[in-house]
Image: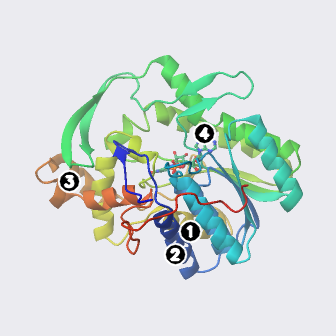
C-alpha cells in the first residue's frame, strides 16, 4: 500500500517501514563512524524502540558489541493499519544487529506489569545469564499499578498557578499565547506514579532478587532540566515532580546495588524531538530556537550523538563525572550560557511573522516526521510498500 503521514496535532497515526529503517541505519552508521567504546556486554533497555532508549541500544550494540534485550510497547501492522514507528525501528535494528553477529531479542508488552518483568528475567536467565547495564527509558501517558490495579494518567501542567507563554503549532508555524491551568494534587500524584521512579525500583528489585544483575552493574534513567522559559511547565510542573522522584530513586537504588558494587544514575539529557517531547506545550518552540542556535555553533545533537557521548565520555570512563546532586550531565552544551543567552533573546522577539527567520522550525518539523519514517531522503513514498514487517525475535 501507499503509506503517507496522517497526523493530528503531535500524533502521527501512520509510520513508514523503509523510512524508519533508514533512520535506524543512520544511527548505526553514526556510531560505527566513531571510536569503539569499552562499555557494557549484556544490556537490558526498557523503552528500547524509539528516542533515547533506541539510541542507547544502538550505541551499546554497535559501539560496544553488547548483546541486548529490548522491552517496549508497540503495535504491529494489521490490515491496512501500519505498525507503529517503534515496531519498524526494532525490526530494522534487530536485522542489522543479527547481520553483524550480535545477539538482540525484544519483548513487546507493558513494562509496568509483573508479567513482562518475569518474561524479561526468564529471557535473561536463558540467553545472557546476567546483565551489566539496565537502561530505564520509558515515557508513557498511563500506568496500571501491578499490585493495586490502580490506573494512573500523567499530565503536563504547572503547579500552584496558571502559566502563560508562547507556543507554536509546528505544522503551520503559528505562534500564539497558551495558558495552562495548574494541576490538582491528585494529578500531581498520578503523574509521579507514571513517570517517577517507582517502576524503575520495581524492575531493579525484581532483577536483583532473580540474581540476573552482574557484579558492577550500572542502571541508568533519563531526566531533563532545561531553561527558565520552560520551568513552569516542565521542571517545576507535574512532570518535574516525577523527575524529582526519579532522581531520588537513583539514590535509593544506589544503596540497593551496593552489595554488587553497582551504580544507579540519572542522566540529564538535552531536549530532542521525540514522540514524547512533541506533546509538551511551549517546548517545541523553545527547541526550534535552540536547534537554530546550536546548529550555527556546530553543537547540534540528536538522540544518537547524545547517547554516544554519554557512554563514551561519562559512563565508561575511569570515573563518571556527576553534578552536586549526583546526576550525570550530558545537557552541558544545551545549557551553556552563550547558547541560553542567544535563545532567550530570540524567545523575546519571536512571533508568527519572523518565526521562519529566527528559528529552525523546518528542522524541528522534519525531525518530527522522521520519527515516523517520513521526509527521509532516498525513500520513495509513491511506491507500494508492505506494512506487515516482522521483528525477527517476536513470533
Ligand atoms: P519516546 O516516546 O521516544 O520513548 C518511549 C519508550 O517507552 C518507547 O520505547 C515506548 O515503546 C516505551 N513505552 C511506553 N510505554 C510503555 C509501556 N507501558 N511498556 C513498555 N514500554 C513502554 O521517549 P523519549 O523522549 O526517548 O523519553 C525517554 C526518557 O528520556 C524519558 O524519561 C524522558 O523524560 C527522557 N528525556 C527525554 C528528553 C527529550 O527531549 N525527548 C530529554 C531528556 C530526557
Label 2: few (<14), some or many (≥20) within 10 Å? some
Local SS, label 2: helix
Please state, as top left, top right, bottom left or bottom right, where the N terminus lies in the image: bottom left
Tell whether 212 sits left or right of 220: right
The answer for how far apart the CA atoms under marks 1 and 2 are is: 9 Å
The answer for how far apart the CA atoms under marks 3 and 4 are is: 32 Å
**Circle 1 residue:** 308
Q: Indicate the quadrant where residue 163 lies.
A: top left
Going from the N terminus, do you reach mark 3 or mark 2 first?
Answer: 2
Label 3: few (<14), some or many (≥20) within 10 Å? some
- Tell me, yes or no, if residue 322 can be seen here: no
Residue appearing at x 56%, y 60% in the figure: 89
**Circle 2 residue:** 30
Q: Which of 216/34 is in front?
A: 34
Residue 206 position, x and y percent, is 81, 41
Tell whether 262 sits left or right of 384: right
Going from the N terminus, do you reach mark 1 or mark 2 first?
Answer: 2
Q: Which of 254/380 is in front?
A: 380
Residue 141 position, x and y percent, is 52, 35
Q: Which mark is residue 346?
A: 3
Tell whether 100 sits left or right of 3: right
Tell whether 200 sits left or right of 76: right
Q: Are marks 3 and 4 in contact (CB under 8 Å)?
A: no
Is the C-beta of the residue carrying label 1 under 8 Å from the nearest atom of ligand 1? no
Is the C-beta of the residue carrying label 3 under 8 Å from the nearest atom of ligand 1? no
Residue 131 position, x and y percent, is 80, 58
Q: Which of 7/141 is in front?
A: 7
Q: Are marks 2 and 4 in contact (CB under 8 Å)?
A: no
The answer for how far apart the CA atoms under marks 2 and 4 are is: 30 Å
In the image, residue 352 above or below residue 101:
above
Amino acid at each position: 500500500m501507499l503509506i503517507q503521514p496522517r497526523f493530528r496535532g503531535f500524533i502521527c497515526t501512520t509510520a513508514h517501514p523503509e523510512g524508519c529503517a533508514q533512520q535506524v541505519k543512520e544511527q548505526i552508521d553514526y556510531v560505527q563512524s566513531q571510536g569503539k567504546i569499552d562499555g557494557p556486554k549484556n544490556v537490558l533497555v526498557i523503552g528500547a524502540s524509539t528516542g533515547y532508549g533506541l539510541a542507547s541500544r544502538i550505541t551499546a550494540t554497535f559501539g560496544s558489541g553488547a548483546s541486548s534485550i529490548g522491552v517496549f510497547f508497540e503495535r504491529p501492522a494489521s490490515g491496512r493499519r501500519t505498525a507503529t514507528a517503534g515496531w519498524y525501528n526494532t525490526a530494522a535494528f534487530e536485522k542489522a544487529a543479527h547481520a553483524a553477529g550480535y545477539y538482540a531479542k525484544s519483548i513487546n508488552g507493558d513494562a509496568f506489569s509483573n508479567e513482562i518483568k518475569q518474561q524479561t528475567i526468564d529471557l535473561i536467565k536463558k540467553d545472557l545469564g546476567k546483565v551489566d547495564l539496565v537502561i530505564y527509558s520509558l515515557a508513557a501517558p498511563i500506568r496500571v499499578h501491578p499490585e493495586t490495579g490502580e490506573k494512573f494518567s500523567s499530565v503536563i501542567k504547572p503547579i500552584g498557578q496558571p502559566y502563560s507563554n508562547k507556543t507554536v503549532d509546528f505544522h503551520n508555524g503559528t505562534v500564539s499565547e497558551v495558558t495552562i491551568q495548574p494541576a490538582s494534587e491528585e494529578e500531581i500524584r498520578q503523574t509521579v506514579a507514571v513517570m517517577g521512579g517507582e517502576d524503575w525500583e520495581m524492575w531493579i528489585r525484581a532483577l536483583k532478587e532473580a540474581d540476573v544483575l552482574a557484579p558492577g552493574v550500572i542502571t541508568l534513567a533519563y531526566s531533563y532540566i532545561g531553561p527558565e522559559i520552560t520551568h513552569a511547565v516542565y521542571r517545576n510542573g507535574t512532570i518535574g515532580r516525577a523527575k524529582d522522584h526519579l532522581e531520588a530513586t537513583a539514590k535509593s537504588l544506589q544503596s540497593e546495588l551496593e552489595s554488587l558494587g553497582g551504580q544507579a544514575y540519572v542522566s540529564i539529557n538535552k531536549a530532542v524531538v521525540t514522540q514524547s517531547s512533541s506533546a509538551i506545550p511551549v517546548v517545541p518552540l523553545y527547541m526550534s530556537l535552540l536547534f537554530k542556535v546550536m546548529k550555527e555553533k556546530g553543537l547540534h545533537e540528536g538522540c544518537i550523538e547524545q547517547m554516544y557521548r554519554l557512554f563514551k565520555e561519562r559512563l565508561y570512563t575511569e570515573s563518571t563525572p556527576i553534578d552536586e546532586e549526583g546526576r550525570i550531565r550530558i545537557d552541558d552544551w544545551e545549557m551553556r550560557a552563550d547558547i541560553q543567552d542567544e535563545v532567550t533573546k530570540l524567545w523575546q522577539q519571536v512571533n508568527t511573522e519572523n518565526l521562519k527567520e529566527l528559528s529552525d522550525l523546518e528542522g524541528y518539523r522534519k525531525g518530527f516526521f522522521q520519527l515516523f519514517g517520513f521526509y527521509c531522503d532516498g525513500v520513495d513514498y509513491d511506491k507500494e510498500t508492505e506494512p506487515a514487517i516482522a521483528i525477527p525475535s517476536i513470533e
